[in-house]
Amino acid sequence: MALSPSGRAILEFLVGELRRGRFRPHDEGTFCGYKEVHDRLGLSRKGFHWGNSLRSQGLADLAEWLRDEKLPALTGLIVGEEEPRRPGPGYFSVFGIPDGDLAWWRTQVRAGIKQDWSKWVTDIGLVDLDDLREDSLSYLEGATKSVSLELRARCDALRTRAREVFRSPDGFLRCEACGWHKPDGRISGDIVELHHLDPLHRAPASGRKVTLEEAIALLVPVCPTCHRMLHSKTGGGQFEVEVLKQILKR
């Protein structure tokens, strides 16, 4: 089915917020409220309930389109303003899911963050392996290598999406090698970094494009200490993450 203009407007809004790294699957406080979507899209409320109003102005169309296209149920990023912030029952029923299945809901949110939406709206889209390689080396070499602001912004957006894909349901971003995570909320930011797996550096095809999903598959979260060890293999090169895990067990 074709997506209606009103449904597309909501999709573009959600993907735009997703692209800026707004959403965290474990934190409903980062999700959009029904009223906020009205305000951001310049919609007037139809009837008493904000949720019913939005459903009649594109949200139901978008949900049915996502279902028919077999895409993640991204409409779950729109929730009520009152605690606990949850999507309405219509969110679950359109996909044939029992009302209140929170595990399914969170799975769909994570899948939506990982999804490459560039086929339908302007998004990160295909990523150039050469760009990823250059950006990765700039982090390893520090000030000895610089990249353009445009490339840095594109790769930063990819890392933002990847962090939310790797983040555990409890909100922690854990090191894949040793399991460490930031111990206290008084420490700002994500201390765990994203390591580019070795296939990225071995990829021979210059100019090769990969999808957002493929690019995220080339990343793995590691703490700064393990990240340094991964790149400290005697004789050059880097360790596989599984090899470092075995080293750390000794």
Image (spheres, rainbow, N blue to C red):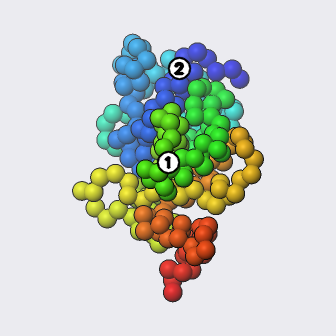
* Residue where numbered disc 1 is placed: 145
Instruction: Decide which of 139, 119 is in the foreground and name it.
Output: 139
> Viewed as shown, does residue 206 lie left or right of 170?
right
Tell me if residue 104 can be seen.
Answer: no
Q: Quadrant of residue 192?
A: bottom left
Question: Considering the image in quadrants, where does the N terminus appear?
Answer: top right
Image location of residue 211, percent across then percent down? 67, 41
Residue at 57% x, 76% y is 234
Image location of residue 142, percent across then percent down? 44, 53
User: Which mark's residue is nearer the viewer, 2 or 1?
Assistant: 1
Vertical relation: 91 (above or below) 43: below
Instruction: Decide which of 92, 125 is in the foreground and name it.
Output: 125
- Please identify the residue farthest to the left as the structure is shown: 186
Tell me if residue 136 can be seen.
Answer: yes
Identify the amino acid type marked 1. Answer: Lys
Identify the amino acid type marked 2. Answer: Ala
Instruction: Decide which of 82, 172 is in the foreground and name it.
Output: 172
- Please identify the residue farthest to the front as the structure is shown: 144
Residue at 37% x, 40% y is 30
Instruction: Decide which of 107, 117 is in the foreground and name it.
Output: 117
Image location of residue 95, percent across then percent down? 61, 38
Image location of residue 200, percent across then percent down? 65, 54
Which badge, 2 or 1, is on the more N-terminal residue? 2
Mark 2–mark 1 contact, CB under 8 Å?
no
As helix, strand or loop, the secondary structure at mark 2 comes to helix
> Viewed as shown, does residue 203 lie left or right of 91?
right
- Please identify the residue farthest to the bottom as the structure is shown: 250
